[in-house]
Image (cartoon, rainbow, N blue to C red):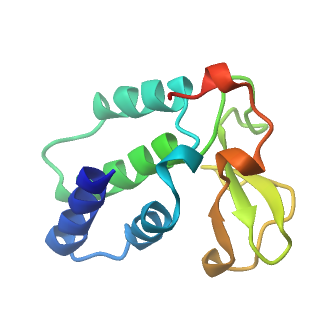
Amino acid sequence: MDDFLALLARAKSLFKTDLFDFWLSQLAETPCSELPITHYGVANARRMLSYFDKRKRETVAWLIADICENLFTYSNNDDACRMQSDFHYYFNVSAGAVFKESRLGEVQGCAPENRAGRRIARVSDLSIPPQELIP
């Protein structure tokens, strides 16, 4: 995990963006055993690498952020929004509840009004089969 934190910190500096701040804070605050890294998420992250355009600098930053979402938030093959975009699971800190959000903006559950009120949904927040997770 330390290597990934270092990679994100370097990317933040290199791209001069705050795009990675959420992921840096989540990885710093979340024990590795609580990260819901799934086989499905890893497969999606790998698949994303084949789509990005190496010629465009801005696509690399967004690709890294998308990979973080695929790796560090829970999602599964059978849970998509109406437009067939995967839901990713987050936690509303003030409400104390899990909600899910798709990349296309569809939300199910109680989302906080701003990004500061959310964190990733941790393994202990979710009821998921252990075989979905990468140990």
| Residue in the image at 29% along x and 75% along y | 17
Q: Is residue 28 left or right of residue 99?
A: left
Comparing 56 with 13, the one in front is: 13
Q: In x, y percent, where is residue 100?
A: 75, 51
Depicted 3 relative to depicted 133: above or below = below
Q: In x, y percent, where is residue 101?
A: 70, 52
| Residue in the image at 58% along x and 41% along y | 36
Q: Is residue 1 left or right of residue 54?
A: right
| Quarter holding residue 96 | bottom right
Comparing 43 with 85, the one in front is: 43
Q: Is residue 61 left or right of residue 78?
A: left
Q: Is residue 8 left or right of residue 126?
A: left
Q: In x, y percent, where is residue 55?
A: 12, 46
Depicted 97 relative to depicted 69: above or below = below
Residue 45 visible to an observer of this rendering: yes
| Residue in the image at 58% along x and 28% along y | 133
Depicted 22 relative to depicted 86: above or below = below
Residue 59 visible to an observer of this rendering: no
Name the residue at the top extreme: 131
Count of all numbered marks drawn on residues in the image: 0
